[in-house]
Amino acid sequence: MPRNAFHEVARAIARGTVGVACILAATQVRAGDGSATGQFESRNWKVPIADAYAFRHEASLGEGKAIWVAVSNGVFGKEYLDACWDRQYLLDNFFADDETRVVYLEFGPTGSYSGYSYYFGSGDGCGFCGGGDVTSTVKLAAGRLAGKVATKGEDVSFDISIDVTIATDDHGTDQGPGGGEPGKAYLAYHAALLAGDVAALKVRLTAARVERWQKAEQDGKGDAFLAYLGENRPQTARVERAFVSGDRALVLVTGESETYGAMHGEAQLRLEGGIWKVDDETIQIGEP
């Protein structure tokens, strides 16, 4: 599956770190903000829980929304995740890895426990495990989930306490059809990337991204960085929606790729010097 042009940056900032050298091992847990403690044990892994991130997501069973709580031995970059649209995709593809594990605890809209899901590898996962002998004291109050969930089974056991605020669903002011100025800025970036127009691209990227590019150029890897920015993306792009909150914008896009067919994703933009500039993007295969 293709990843976005900034996937190593997304992996780092989804963890709240500044570089991929800060990958967390399961045996080297850093303290989170106290939002989760305990342990999750599967057939092959014992995962000490260090942090939690709660957000609303489509329910695994039935219709409507549920509250998902991602728990992990890693530490989440909550501010970055709050600004994202498809949080599960970010967590599964740019946060979780062979050492950093993620388990989802699912709760109903009123805070009642529904089940859990995880994937640690072939034969060690569950798309959704509901029911069973699971005890839950978790309650929903004032936008927070707090309490304990626990079970002890042959394949999976866990005893996890959480006290976590549910992430906002307010991404800012809807910019209307075409995404307004952030939408135009993203399409200008996309066009410059397809054309290989280095000068135009550097105008459309944030200062932080340009700095990374300049470092690559100093190392004789400028052409490789340009190619890297353009890999695994659609040839055509259309802005579906955009939201603005202060100096940040979230742009939702769809498109078509000759290789992958329908694609969709999101881009994070920042307002720098009065110009909307692309700071990060994630693109994935399929319809939104």
Image: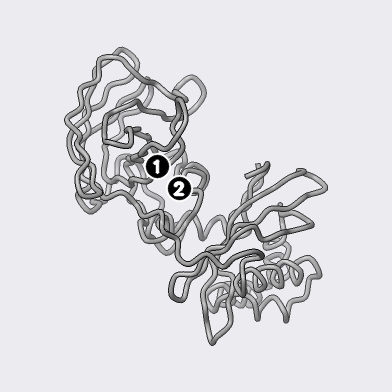
Q: Are marks 1 and 2 in contact (CB under 8 Å)?
A: yes
Residue 95 is tagged as 2
Q: Nearer the viewer, residue 59 or 44?
A: 59
Name the residue tied to disc 1: 100
Among the two numbered marks 1 and 2 on one chain, the one whose residue lies closer to the N terminus:
2
Crowdedness of circle 2 by 10 Å Cα count: few (<14), some, many (20+)? many
Residue 138 location, x and y as percent?
Answer: 20, 34
Residue 261 location, x and y as percent?
Answer: 77, 43
- Residue 122 lies, with reference to residue 29, above or below; the image says above
Label 1, label 2: how far apart the Cα atoms are: 7 Å
Q: How many discs mark residues in the rendered view? A: 2
**Element under label 1?**
loop
- Residue 58 lies, with reference to residue 169, above or below; the image says above
Which corner quadrant of the image does residue 19 belong to?
Answer: bottom left
Q: Quadrant of the N terminus?
A: top right
Residue 249 location, x and y as percent?
Answer: 51, 68
Q: Looking at numbered disc 1 in the image, what kind of residue is underneath it?
A: Thr
What residue is at 29 percent from the left and 30 percent from the top? 40
Q: Nearer the viewer, residue 142 or 22?
A: 142
Which corner quadrant of the image does residue 159 belong to?
Answer: top left
Residue 11 location, x and y as percent?
Answer: 48, 54
Asked whether residue 148 is in view, the answer is yes
Q: Looking at numbered disc 2 in the image, what kind of residue is underneath it?
A: Phe
What residue is at 30 percent from the left and 29 percent from the top? 46
Asked whether residue 125 is in view, the answer is no
